[in-house]
Image (cartoon, rainbow, N blue to C red):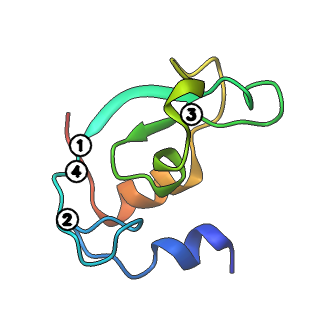
Amino acid sequence: MSVDTQVLRAPAAGVTAAMPGKVTMLKRVQPYHDVGTHRHGGVYHDRSDCPAGQRLHSDHLVAGTWNLPRCGQCRVLDEMAPVRG
């Protein structure tokens, strides 16, 4: 079992994986990624509730996908709690 699956298995719709038990509004955001990882197998994020995206330091974020693959945790969150918009 992958780490992504373990982290994201329990939360119900409306509950973030990063803060279990805290209800938040889930939303899709403009794609962003960490400028320091885009050359080394980085991924882009597009969900406000993505635990991996929330751990990134804001000083290192840049807009866009830069042709990077989508974050696996963002994909799993879409399967668990789809977000429109």
Separation of marks 4 and 1 at Cα, in angstroms: 4 Å
Q: Position of residue 14 (x, y in %)?
A: 19, 65
The percent coordinates of residue 43 (x first, y second) are 64, 37
Q: Residue at x 45, y 27 (%)?
A: 31
Q: Quadrant of the N terminus?
A: bottom right
Q: Residue at x 54, y 52 (%)?
A: 52
Q: Up-down: is 50 above or below 40? A: below
What residue would you read off at disc 1? 27
Task: Give the residue type at disc 2.
Answer: Gly
**1 or 3: tag closer to the N-terminus:** 1
Image side of residue 32 versus residue 67, left or right: left
Q: Amino acid at mark 1?
A: Lys
- The residue type indicated by label 4 comes to Leu
Which of pointers 4 and 2 lies earlier in the amino acid sequence?
2
| Residue under pointer 2 | 14
Q: Indicate the amino acid at tag 3.
A: Tyr
User: Distance of mark 1 from mark 2, alpha carbons?
Assistant: 10 Å
Q: Under tag 3, what secondary structure? A: loop
Between 11 and 22, the one lying in front of the other is 22
Q: Quadrant of residue 67?
A: top right
Marked residue nearer the N-terminal end (1 or 2): 2
Residue annotated with mark 4:
26
**Are discs 4 and 2 less than 8 Å apart at CB?**
yes
Residue 48 is left or right of residue 33, and the answer is left
The answer to the question of whether label 1 and label 3 lie on touching residues, with beta carbons closer than 8 A, is no
Q: Of the numbered discs in the image, which one, if any, rests on residue 44?
A: 3
The residue at the far right in this view is 40
Task: Categorize mark 3 by other alpha carbons within 10 Å: few (<14), some (14-19), many (20+).
Answer: many
- The secondary element bearing badge 1 is classed as loop
Placement of the C terminus among the 4 image quadrants: top left
Along the polypeptide, which appears first: circle 3 or circle 4?
A: 4
Q: Are marks 4 and 1 in contact (CB under 8 Å)?
A: yes
